[in-house]
Amino acid sequence: MKKCMDSVEKTQDQQHPQYKRDRATVDTLLASEATEYNLSELARLKIRYRGFPGARDIQADLEKVMQKLNHTEETLYEQTRKIHADAQVYRRQKNDQEDWL
């Protein structure tokens, strides 16, 4: 029965439209330090992939980054709210497109 349930879960996994770009960002986060920009990116991706039925590798790696930086979701969001209140972390790109969700 468990094998049947595992195969059902796998067939329901979805490919996120931003997967390729996000995978590269997560790889950078895994190898980087806790800058304001990196913390903001981590928080943004945690929100994007919360409850998403797929991209399990990204979700697992985001958890690794959280542990590496010694953050819980609560402490991460608290810190990034302060960062965004004090500074403009994201500068507009030439195409003026925002990439939140």
Image (cartoon, grey):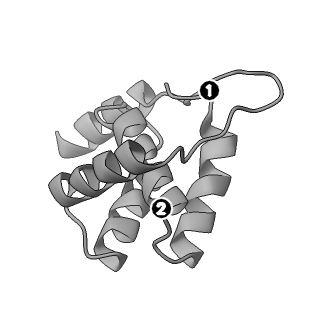
Using the image, determine if residue 37 lies above or below residue 43: below
Q: Residue, x 69% and y 42% (percent of image)?
A: 20
Q: Quadrant of residue 21?
A: top right
Q: Please state which of residues 70 and 8 is positioned toward the viewer in this rendering.
A: 70
Q: Please state which of residues 9 and 50 is positioned toward the viewer in this rendering.
A: 50
Residue 30, numbered label:
none
Q: Amino acid at mark 2?
A: Glu
Q: Residue, x 50% and y 69% (percent of image)?
A: 35
- Provide residue 81's location: percent of width, then percent of height: 30, 46
Q: Earlier in the sequence, mark 2 or mark 1?
A: 1
Q: Residue, x 27% and y 44% (percent of image)?
A: 3
Q: Quadrant of residue 71?
A: bottom left
Q: Give the labeled residue for mark 2.
A: 36
Using the image, determine if residue 6 lies above or below residue 83: above
Q: Give the labeled residue for mark 1.
A: 17
Disc 1 packing (10 Å; few <14; some 14–19; many ≥20): few
Q: Please state which of residues 14 and 28 is positioned toward the viewer in this rendering.
A: 28
- Provide residue 50's location: percent of width, then percent of height: 31, 37
